[in-house]
């Protein structure tokens, strides 16, 4: 029997919550996917990604979530009420506080799958005095192929409703600069949001970002990163053979 979206969301979540990976521990991180019927599934508040099952996801009415996001601000009490009122099934678990950020990513980020974690390697850089600066240029070709040539950045902001607005602003700035959506949104002092076309795409991107981050950290022990030229990175992004390889990577492990 073919896995349905919810099964694949469980797979994505368990991969994100694997203890050996240190991408998300305890109740950290959240994942989501569009259902194809005007709703999306998002992790329930407090659920552990590494032990996720189908019951740990709440189906959300996307249109209702986006209506709330149009409001300039909401109090903490209003956010709790909103999270309850956008559930398709009123008896389902309370969705993650980042439910509104997922709505923004799924509706404005040209993606169908979203994964968010707090990886030790990425946070070692995002929480440093340098912020996202070490990622500004690439250090090896595979990161360009899998993670994308450019990424979006959101300075630290209160998680939840305010963060949804900040992510929306950052996505629209990115799209007007690059003509497409990013695969990675870096939230400074918080963690990355990965936007993907499939659950495999999201796992691949986080796996490569984790490797990229570990190498960057090691580079600083040896005089700092030696960056590829902008021209070389642009060239890798445009190469036809790399586009083919990118496509094959998405096909594997299905
Ligand atoms: Zn988070």
Image: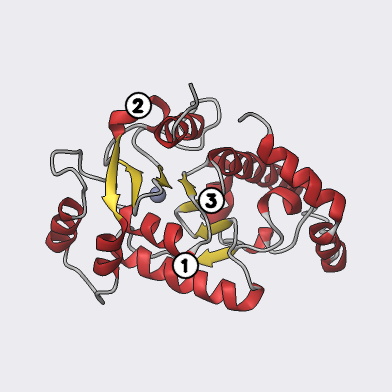
Q: Nearer the viewer, mark 1 or mark 3?
A: 3
Give the residue at x 58% y 73%.
Answer: 175
Name the quarter where the C terminus is drawn.
top right
CA distance separating discs 1 and 3:
16 Å
Name the secondary structure under disc 2: loop
Q: In this orientation, does residue 238 appear?
A: yes
Residue holding disc 2: 53
Q: Residue at x 44, y 32 (%)?
A: 4
Disc on res. 155: 1
In primary-sequence order, the first of circles 3 and 2 is 2
Q: Is residue 228 shown above or below 174? A: above
What colouring method underlies this structural image? secondary structure
- In the rendered image, residue 105, in percent from the top left (x then y), is placed at 45, 59
Q: x and y percent of residue 223 in the render?
A: 80, 53
- Marks 1 and 2 close (CB-CB < 8 Å): no
Image position, residue 220 (x, y; %):
73, 50
List the residue tagged with mark 3: 194
Which of the two discs, 1 and 3, labels the residue nearer the N terminus? 1
Residue in view at x 27 percent, y 61 percent: 65
Between disc 3 and disc 2, the foreground one is 2
Quarter of the image where one finds residue 101: bottom left
Drawn side of residue 90 relative to residue 214, left or right:
left
Distance CA(mark 1)–CA(mark 2): 32 Å
Q: Indicate left or right for 12 with 46 as reference.
A: right
- Count neighbours of disc 1 (C-alpha within 10 A) and say few if under 14, some if 14 to 19, many if 20 or more: some
Which secondary structure, mark 3?
strand
């Amino acid at each position: 029997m073919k896995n349905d979206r919810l099964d694949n969301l469980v797979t994505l979540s368990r991969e994100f919550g694997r203890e050996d990976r240190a991408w998300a521990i305890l109740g950290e991180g959240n994942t989501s996917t569009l259902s194809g019927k005007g709703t999306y599934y998002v992790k329930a508040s407090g659920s552990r990604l590494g032990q996720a099952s189908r019951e740990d996801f709440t189906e959300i009415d996307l249109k209702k979530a986006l209506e709330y996001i149009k409001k300039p601000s909401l109090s903490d009490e209003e956010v709790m009420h909103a999270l309850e009122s956008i559930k398709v099934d009123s008896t389902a678990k309370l969705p993650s506080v980042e439910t509104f950020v997922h709505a923004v990513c799924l509706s404005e980020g040209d993606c169908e799958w979203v994964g968010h974690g707090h990886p030790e390697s990425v946070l070692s850089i995002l929480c440093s005095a340098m912020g996202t600066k070490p990622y500004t240029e690439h250090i090896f070709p595979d990161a360009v192929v899998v993670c994308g040539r450019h990424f979006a950045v959101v300075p630290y902001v209160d998680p939840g409703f305010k963060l949804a607005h900040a992510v929306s602003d950052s996505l629209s700035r990115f799209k007007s600069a690059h003509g497409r959506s990013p695969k990675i949104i870096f939230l400074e002092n918080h963690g990355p949001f990965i936007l993907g076309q499939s659950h495999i795409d999201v796992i691949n991107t986080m796996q490569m970002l984790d490797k990229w981050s570990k190498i960057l950290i090691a580079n600083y022990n040896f005089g700092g990163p030696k960056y590829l030229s902008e021209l070389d990175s642009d060239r890798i992004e445009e190469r036809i053979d790399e586009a083919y390889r990118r496509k094959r990577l998405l096909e594997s492990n299905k």
